[in-house]
């Protein structure tokens, strides 16, 4: 919510897009549909992705980061949304659930730039190192992921 308590149309798009990537029903094709055809997405320190196809591919590229878990889903805990012109600023936590239990809560900050009612650019600033560390202490059974 904005400092003034107003939820704008652009803020609603941000909330809807994040919701589309959450839980067991996550649909990354819907997530990508919120972008313009030539949009850019910068996820943490990973390479910038240009265009919907490349943005969609990032989810496949990140999948190995959580291999070894039987069920991993994400959620978002939005703390603040602010809007200035065609930009929305989102302060939140990305939540990582393993077998339904929250295991990681990573603070992040997103900057969305809109073109009309679609996202032209999304830059997500977060420290992904908790995703890359040795997970053997988190997984009592199965093959743990040892990080990159």
Image: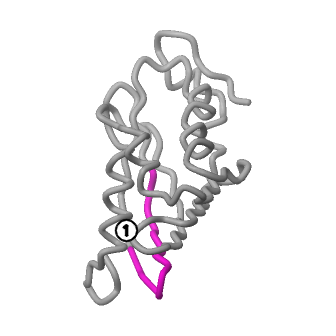
The vertical placement of 13 against 47, above or below, is below
Spot occupied by residue 1 in the image (x, y as percentages of width and height): 31, 76
Q: Secondary structure at mark 1?
A: strand
Magenta span: predominant SS is strand
Residue 143 picture quarter: top right
Viewer-closest of 106 and 76: 76
Please count the marks in the image: 1
Residue at image x 31%, y 31%? 24
- Range shown magenta: 81-94
Give yes or no for residue 87 being in the magenta stretch.
Answer: yes
Residue at image x 35%, y 72%? 11
Query: Mark 1 highlights which residue?
Result: 79
The vertical placement of 45 against 86, above or below, is above
Viewer-closest of 116 and 107: 116
Quadrant in which the C terminus is drawn: top right
Residue at image x 34%, y 65%? 13
């Amino acid at each position: 919510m904005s400092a003034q308590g107003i939820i704008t149309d652009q803020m609603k798009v941000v909330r809807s897009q994040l919701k589309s990537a959450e839980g067991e029903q996550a649909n990354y094709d819907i997530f990508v549909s919120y972008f313009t055809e030539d949009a850019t997405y910068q996820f943490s320190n990973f390479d910038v992705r240009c265009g919907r196809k490349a943005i969609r591919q990032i989810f496949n590229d990140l999948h190995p980061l959580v291999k070894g878990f039987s069920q991993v889903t994400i959620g978002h805990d939005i703390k603040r949304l602010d809007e200035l012109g065609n930009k929305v600023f989102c302060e939140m936590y990305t939540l990582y659930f393993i077998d339904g239990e929250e295991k990681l809560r990573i603070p992040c900050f997103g900057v969305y730039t809109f073109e009309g009612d679609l996202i032209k650019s999304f830059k997500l600033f977060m420290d992904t190192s908790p995703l890359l560390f040795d997970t053997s202490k988190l997984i009592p059974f199965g093959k743990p992921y040892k990080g990159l």
